[in-house]
Every structure is written in structure tokens, then in C-alpha cells.
Amino acid sequence: MSDVYPGSTPALSDLAVLLRRCADGDQAAFRTLYEQQSPRLYGLALRLMQQPALAADAMHDAFVQVWQRSAQFDPSRGAAEAWLSSLLRYRAIDILRRRAREHYGHEPADEPDPSPDALDHLSEVADGDALRRCLEQLEVGQRRVVTLAFMDGLSHSELSSRLDAPLGTVKSWVRRALISLRRCLEP
């Protein structure tokens, strides 16, 4: 096999050479490998994932794996192109499984909080300045969740969609923000 130089377009059989050079820490070889293979791998990821952002994430993760594990490639066990495709496929599957657990897992039904409602407590506060002061003391993220939930009237599910966060996480954010407000408003 001939060596592959940066700027040249290697044949597919030269992928093994590029991978061997990547294993030696050759950044120029990695760049050449990326420039040659990224369009094909992105197309494969897009077919697997059906979402451009997720496909780009899978491709990025696959190339990180290429850089870290190129020494593990053994040309006697298969073609370099197939090895790269399998790295991408496994990264895509990992991302899809992670998203399925985050967004499509079982979520318990919304149940009312048995403790006194923080909103009832807030409505009892005669001094609006105290409420304003307490809201300003919240972290930016907590203040945003409270504002979206109680001023804009968004449900937990709507907050989850708007903030692109799992439903359980959003519920925790709201609860923590309300607890912080309650503590601040207590005499």
C-alpha cells in the first residue's frame, strides 16, 4: 500500500493506512480520513436516524471513536470502510436508545403534591415586593421555569417540550423552584 498524504484523495484500500497513521497520532491522516469518509458516514447516519442533528452527533461520536480506537482496527478481520460504518452504526444505536429512555419511557401520572400548595402560599403574601425579591433570588433557570409554568400557564409536558428536557427533570426543576420560593417567603 502506498502512503497517503494530506490533501490527496486516498483509495478505499488506503483507509487501512490512514487508520494505522491515526493510531500513531497523525492528525493530518485523521483530517484526510475525515474529509474522505464524513460525507458517506453522515449519509448513513441520516438514513439510520432520520434527524440531521442526531446524525451529526452520531458521526461526531464515531470519529471520536476512530481517533481513540484506530489501533484496534485489524485489516485481516475486514475492510476499513466496514469498520468505520460499524462504529457509526453503534454510536447511532446508542444515541437512539438514550433518547428513547429519556423521552419515551414510562412517566408516572401527574399527582397533586400533598404538601401545602406553594401557589396558595404565594397568594397569601400581601406584599408583592417580597414575591419579586424572592423571584429575583432564584437561579435564572428556576426563575424561567416558574415564569413559564405559572405566568404563561404551561403544563409540565409543555415545559418539557419547550425546554427540550425529560418530563421528570422538568417536574424536579419546578418543585425545587417552588420549595426555594416557599423558604424565601416564610416569615
Image: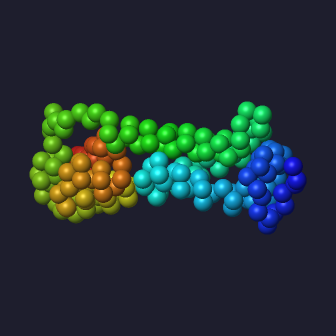
Q: In percent of the image, x 19 and y 61: which residue is there?
A: 151
The front one of 124 and 86 is: 86
Residue 12 at what x, y percent from top left? 73, 52
The front one of 28 and 50 is: 50
Q: Residue furthest bottom?
A: 7
Residue 117 at what x, y percent from top left? 15, 42
Residue 109 at what x, y percent from top left? 19, 35
Q: In percent of the image, x 74 and y 42: which residue is there?
A: 70
Image quadrant where residue 140 sits: bottom left
Q: Residue furthest right?
A: 2
Q: Is residue 22 left or right of residue 100?
A: right
Image quadrant where residue 126 sits: bottom left
Above-or-below relation of 147 to 70: below
Residue 147 appears in view: yes
Above-or-below relation of 59 to 75: below
Q: Is residue 129 left or right of residue 22?
A: left
The front one of 113 and 134 is: 113
Q: In percent of the image, x 23 and y 33: which residue is there?
A: 108
Residue 65 appears in view: no
Q: In percent of the image, x 11 and y 51: which residue is there?
A: 124
